[in-house]
Amino acid sequence: MTMHRTFIALALTASLGATVLGAGVALAAEGQVIPPPQKWSFSGPFGKFDQGQLQRGFKVYKEVCASCHSMSLLSFRNLAEPGGPGFSEKQVEALAAEYKIKDLDDKGEAIERNGRPADKFPAPFANPLAAAAANGGVAPPDFSTLAKARTYERGFPWWIIDIFSQYQEQGPDYIHALLVGYEDAPKGFTMPPGGNYNKYFPGHVIAMPKPINEGQVTYDDGAPQTLEQYSHDVAAFMVWAAEPHMVARKRLGFQVMIFLLVLSGLLYFTKKKVWSAVH
Amino acid sequence: MSGHSTYQPQNGFLQWIEKRLPIGGLIHSSFIAYPTPKNLNYWWTFGGILSFMLGVQIITGIVLAMHYTPHVDLAFNSVETIMRDVNYGWLLRYVHSNGASMFFIAVYIHIFRGMYYGSYKEPREVLWILGVIIYLLMMATGFLGYTLPWGQMSFWGATVITNFFSAIPGVGETVVTWLWGGYAVGNPTLNRFYSLHYLLPFVIAGVVVLHVWALHVVGQNNPAGIEPKSDKDTVPFTPYATVKDGFFIVVFCIMYAWFVFYTPNFLGHADNYIAANPAVTPAHIVPEWYYLPFYAILRAIPDKLLGVLAMFGSIAILAFLPWLDTSRVKSARYRPLYRQFFWLFVAVCIGLGWLGSKPAEGIYTLIARILTFYYFAHFIIVLPLLGIFEKSKPLPNSISESVLAKA
């Protein structure tokens, strides 16, 4: 059997598998409303973060989300690092100084000092138990990796198409949908005490009350102060927080791809030449 | 096959060494003069790809180990520190985590290639069994490695897999406590998993040496499934196989790099970006994709002990393949019926993989049972009977003849 026929056989097997898989999609989709896909500046092989958007998203985080959600893996200095929101070092120093950091002085006495760029973002609660106690029994999730920790099932054939289209923005799509997804519970829906109805939250009952409203955060760059815009900006910021080297990764990836394509071409012709005498 | 080396070093120092330790001759006879059938197709390059992947995993793994902390309170954050603050740490970690998947893609192609062309048949039984052992070690290594980031899937995957051993009658609970180093998956578990995850790749490397040794004694099978009869049927490993393997390793790397740089988390699970929490169980505990067919077999059986036995049996049965397949014709090219059953078997394995990712309920369980039955039937019923009843096509007289017939 030649390579050619083997590939045909493989394709047939794949399509047989696909037919079987197709039956499962309808079953998989129930239970969660699929978040509508959004346009993101960082999607695709040449995607880059929009600095203005990350700065606005950080403002939303700082003024709204940070009162309950920690972001413990990030330091202030990250905000000035390449590929990120692009704050200047001076801005970061000033920003860090706004925070009070618990520390020890050189006599071992507990003190509070002004933050420095190297400090991690301080958490809003002293510990996870305190965070849970203040929020109806469940600690609000940390923001550091949250954009990579949230997803929804893509189903067949999308999960295969995603390999080639590089769609991987389930996290920000879901975060955006969640923030705009607060609505009145449909008639006959029994809401447990402390619950809030959200169209996109799995099971629709979310402990977090509607966190942000139109006009709540003031933007200095003229961007619309709408819920839609806030949701986009904070979701983009969370993607950067979870994957701060994404831009560098995609840039290096393109260089590696060019290198591998050229090398494979050269090796292919070398192989042809070496084998040309064999019959 | 390797035969006596004709290696004669010109350099005086190398001659001096060669008289005392004939390592030059060993390398020369194994990787330069070693005769390979000239009709090998690209499916034969996956052995080289697998060696390459083992090297990549060991090198990236050693560097990652320099930055990783195996402690339940620190492991998750230490991996994130690698991703954020270690220079090119994100690259090392994505190359390593996606490397595991690439390793398994390559090994599955390698195994199915062996099945299609009957590479397990006499005189290659030991070669095949060594391969099954490598595959088992890879499964163990992959599982241990997946626990190390100590995310939710790490923790709950480790809990589910180690609980298999509680199915052993009588001593099950004791064995599990011993495996955990405590009464639950905890810090001692993570420490020993880390230790073993560092150890096993070198065990794999050792068995790979045996695998290559056995290969070089019996020689490679080939698409015609007949042994080389003269020098006309073979070409020397270098340059012919080296340049062909090299070319396809680079092609394989294009796919690998696509995942690493463009969709690095596609093959992982989102829940593993949540730090392990023994108090919160994920909605669906799903193993890595490369275990899914076996996970489906496990869950298809209603009894826990029988389920575990079926799961391990589904891998162990591979070791008996040389004797379960009764046909004397190796290559599926000359076995019209086997060829169809082979592709059916591939489809069943893919189907089981899909079922492994689905909840074990309703129609899924029913399909999983049917496919599990067929998986075993392929080995126990189909293969023994096919060898007796199948009418194979006439074999060519030599590899050269088969190549010329095709041209």
Image (tube, rainbow, N blue to C red):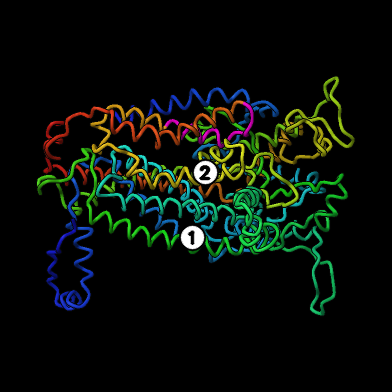
Q: Nearer the viewer, residue A227 or B372?
A: B372
Q: Residue at image x 85%, y 54%?
A: A130
Q: Give the image location of residue A236, x and y in percent.
A: 65, 41
- Residue A194, compared with residue B69, is above or below; it is above
Mark 1: amino acid: Gly
Residue A33 disc label: none
Q: From the viewer's perspective, is B165 left or right of B330?
A: right
* Magenta stretch in the rendered image: B347-362
Magenta span includes B355? yes
Mark 2: amino acid: Met
Quarter of the N terminus of chain A within the rendering: top left
Q: From the viewer's perspective, is B400 left or right of A165?
A: left
- Residue B273 visible here: no
Q: Residue at image x 88%, y 37%?
A: A194
Name the residue furthest top.
A187
Counting every numbered tag in the picture gives 2
- Judging from the image, what secondary structure is the residue with disc 2 in? helix
Q: Residue at image x 85%, y 35%?
A: A195
Q: Which residue position is annotated with label 1?
A: B61
Q: Give the image location of residue A88, x and y in percent.
A: 65, 55
Specify the quadrant of the image occupied by residue B57: bottom left
Q: Residues within 10 Å of mark 2 (few under 14, many from 20)?
A: many
